[in-house]
């Protein structure tokens, strides 16, 4: 798709923004009845008591409920809300949280397309607007957020995709961290990829080689190898093309085409915040060449109705609603939330595969609908693993997730051996590629 059409996508998404109204204070009156007074006469020398007399006094009291002060929340996005990926997903979560909290009780605003080096100025702007809760939504905003939390101790801060202490270890108690984590969903995408690939070669368009993206790539490749080797007895081959941008549809498009034409990839995953890679796959489908891709952060099926296999979707709303409630009720707790499959749902017990909720919206992270082109036995496998992940019965970064084999990096070093699973620290700091990836990880 050409640049003009991509721009129209962004413009169309930006135009969907809406802002809801303002509440009015109300006064409540109440009537209180009180005072029963009884007459009484003594009893003396056989004389009976006099008949009682009852007098009722009616007292009217007016109770006025003061106007509820609106919660003011400010968001800072690294990209445009029209990217239909990361920033659009956060804005969708903002609107969801506003609606659930009560649009008459919260006023939220955002600043979009903020360069990471300029987050301090954006935070100051939101403080001056009276925001008591400020949410910053990019890994590179972490230290600026920590510094602002120290500067404004009467405000509350949430940083997305980093860790609460900040890289400098200087975050005070009015700062929390949160993340909606995708590595489990990427593994399931990999199962879908390995189930449909005809070339045995999958590709990934990566934004930046930070641990978040690296673990997603590794999980995707492990899933693809699991399914492909089960089918064919051969290991998958994977190629990664780095574009060093979060929102760069033309770069993502060029990288996707190169992966197909030069590397023979027929399934493409990506971390770039537009549907560009999925659109490339759809174009190949229309030309008669089977190339497949996924949704990323939002449901992108409309951009690749034939090429779309499934995908990872986030609803940040439940996480944001938690913080709204904490601030509004003066019950702030410093937390580090890492939401995965099964979190923020009312029923996280695993279901039988045939009754699985995989492919339906739930919680904070969930799987996009499964394309019927995925063979039925692999659809059941995907659903089985999805349900097992709800209870943490199965984890991708384990020997079980690699056909019983230890997980090795590109140099052959064993990173996960039998009986082990990758813990939070291994996942959070992942700086190595699994052995099935051809290109070295940039340093």
Image (cartoon, rainbow, N blue to C red):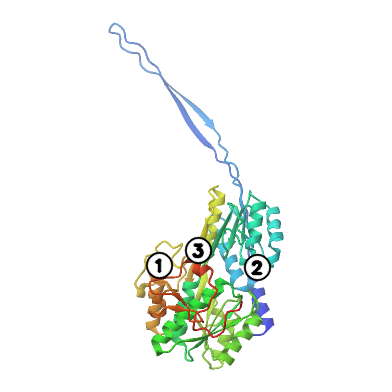
Disc 1 to disc 2, C-alpha distance? 32 Å
- Of 426 and 14, the residue lying toward us: 426
Which quadrant would the N terminus be assigned to in this image? bottom right
- Is residue 366 at least partly visible in the picture? yes
Where residue 175 appears, as percent x and y from the top left, is: 59, 55
Q: Earlier in the sequence, mark 1 or mark 3?
A: 3
Binning the other alpha carbons within 10 Å of mark 3 as few (below 14), some (14 to 19) or many (20 upward) gives some
Q: Which residue is mark 3?
A: 338
| Residue name at image x 43 percent, y 66 percent | 342
Disc 2 to disc 3, C-alpha distance? 20 Å
Q: Nearer the viewer, mark 1 or mark 2?
A: 1
| Residue name at image x 72 percent, y 60 percent | 121
Q: Earlier in the sequence, mark 2 or mark 3?
A: 2
- Is residue 370 at least partly visible in the picture? no
Binning the other alpha carbons within 10 Å of mark 2 as few (below 14), some (14 to 19) or many (20 upward) gives many
Name the element at disc 3. strand
Q: Which residue is mark 1?
A: 392
Q: Which residue is mark 2?
A: 78
Disc 1 to disc 3, C-alpha distance? 14 Å
């Amino acid at each position: 798709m050409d640049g003009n059409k991509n721009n129209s996508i962004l413009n169309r998404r930006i135009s969907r923004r809406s802002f809801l109204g303002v509440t009015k204070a109300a006064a409540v009156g109440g009537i209180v009845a009180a005072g029963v007074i009884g007459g009484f006469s003594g009893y003396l020398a056989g004389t009976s008591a006099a008949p009682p007399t009852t007098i009722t006094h009616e007292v009217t009291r007016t109770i006025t409920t003061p106007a509820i002060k609106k919660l003011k929340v400010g968001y800072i996005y690294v990209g445009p809300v029209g990217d239909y990926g990361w920033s659009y997903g956060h804005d969708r979560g903002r609107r969801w949280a506003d609606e659930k909290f009560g649009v008459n009780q919260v006023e939220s605003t955002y600043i979009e397309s903020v360069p990471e080096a300029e987050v301090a100025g954006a935070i100051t702007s939101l403080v001056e607007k009276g925001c008591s809760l400020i949410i910053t939504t990019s890994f590179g905003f972490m230290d600026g957020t920590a510094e602002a939390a120290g500067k404004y101790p009467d405000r509350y801060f949430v940083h997305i995709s980093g860790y609460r202490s900040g890289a400098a270890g200087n975050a005070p108690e009015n700062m929390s961290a949160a993340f909606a984590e995708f590595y489990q969903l990427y593994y399931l995408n990999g199962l879908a990829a390995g189930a449909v690939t005809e070339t045995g070669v999958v590709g990934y368009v990566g934004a930046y080689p930070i641990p978040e993206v690296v673990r997603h790539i590794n999980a995707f490749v492990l899933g693809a190898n699991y399914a492909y080797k089960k089918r064919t007895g051969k290991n998958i081959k994977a190629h990664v093309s780095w574009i060093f941008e979060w929102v760069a549809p033309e770069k993502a498009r060029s990288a996707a085409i190169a992966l197909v034409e030069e590397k023979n990839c027929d399934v493409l995953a990506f971390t770039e915040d537009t549907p560009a890679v999925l659109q490339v796959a759809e174009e190949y489908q229309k030309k008669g060449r089977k190339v497949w891709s996924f949704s990323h952060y939002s449901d992108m099926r409309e951009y690749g109705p034939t090429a779309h296999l499934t995908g990872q979707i986030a609803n940040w709303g439940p996480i944001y609603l938690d913080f709204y409630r904490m601030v509004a009720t003066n019950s702030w707790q410093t937390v580090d939330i890492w939401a995965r499959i099964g979190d923020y749902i009312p029923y996280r017990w695993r279901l039988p595969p045939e009754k699985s909720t995989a492919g339906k919206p739930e919680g904070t992270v969930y799987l996009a609908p499964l394309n019927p082109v995925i063979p039925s036995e692999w659809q059941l496998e995907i659903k089985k693993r999805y349900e097992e992940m709800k209870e943490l019965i199965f984890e991708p970064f384990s020997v079980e997730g690699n056909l019983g084999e230890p997980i090795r990096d590109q140099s052959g070093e064993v990173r996960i051996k039998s009986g082990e699973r990758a813990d939070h620290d291994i996942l959070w700091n992942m700086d190595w590629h699994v052995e099935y990836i051809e290109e070295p990880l940039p340093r």
